[in-house]
Image (cartoon, grey):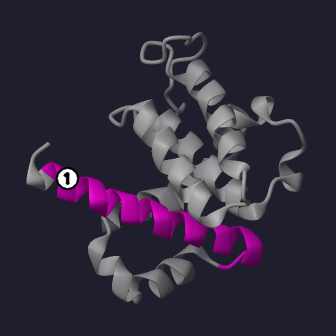
């Protein structure tokens, strides 16, 4: 992988982490997305993040929340409201990426989500997140996933 590709990956990884934290904050506080975004833009760590990707995740996940949640809720073993808020933010964000960002391989999305869950979620939660997202990817990424069967993987306009 080229240095610029590696750098872009690191920028996107940080954007995902910050977006997950911002989506968690939005879920818990109900604050305005623009206010939350402004707060994160002031963070020193934000200079090392893909700002456009952060903005997309922060605004598109809530804008398409019904579609995003419909993608993964069939694979939950309990009601969504009982899922830990950090893990809920991760499931929403990753499912949005699986639906809308078909330019990103599903394995990358799942791996990034598992890594974030290991860092911010409950002790063994990464196994659950991995399982739910793998089943979601099977459904949404039929061409890409070896066990895929289902929809187109595209959000409807």
Position of the N terminus by quadrant: top left
Q: Disc 1 marks which residue?
A: 6
Q: Quick check: 148 above or below 58?
A: above
In the rendering, at what x and y percent does residue 22 appear?
57, 72
Hey, which quadrant is residue 12 in on the image?
A: bottom left
Q: Residue at x 11, y 54 (%)?
A: 4
Is 8 included in the stretch rendered in magenta?
yes
Q: Predominant secondary structure in magenta?
A: helix
Residue drawn at (69%, 63%), measured in percent from left and top? 86
| Camera-nearest residue between 67 and 145 | 145
In the image, the segment drawn in magenta is 5-31
Residue at 30% across, 64% down: 50
- SS label for mark 1: helix
Quick one: 135 or 124, which is closer to the camera? 124
**Residue neighbourhood size for the residue with mark 1, other residues' Cα within 10 Å, grouped as few (<14), some (14–19), many (≥20):** few
Residue shown at the point (56%, 48%) measured from the top left:
114
């Amino acid at each position: 992988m080229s240095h610029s590709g590696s750098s872009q990956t690191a920028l996107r990884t940080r954007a995902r982490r910050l977006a997950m934290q911002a989506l968690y904050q939005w879920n818990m506080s109900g604050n305005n997305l623009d206010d939350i975004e402004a707060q994160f833009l002031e963070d020193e760590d934000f200079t090392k993040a893909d700002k456009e990707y952060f903005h997309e995740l922060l605004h598109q996940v809530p804008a398409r929340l019904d579609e995003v949640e419909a993608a993964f809720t069939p694979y939950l073993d309990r009601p969504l409201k009982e899922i830990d808020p950090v893990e809920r933010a991760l499931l929403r964000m990753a499912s949005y990426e699986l639906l809308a960002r078909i330019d990103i391989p599903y394995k990358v999305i799942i791996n990034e989500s598992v890594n974030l869950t290991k860092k911010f979620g409950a002790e063994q939660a990464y196994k659950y997140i991995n399982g739910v997202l793998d089943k979601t990817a099977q459904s949404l990424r039929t061409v890409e996933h070896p066990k895929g069967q289902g929809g187109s993987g595209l959000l409807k306009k």
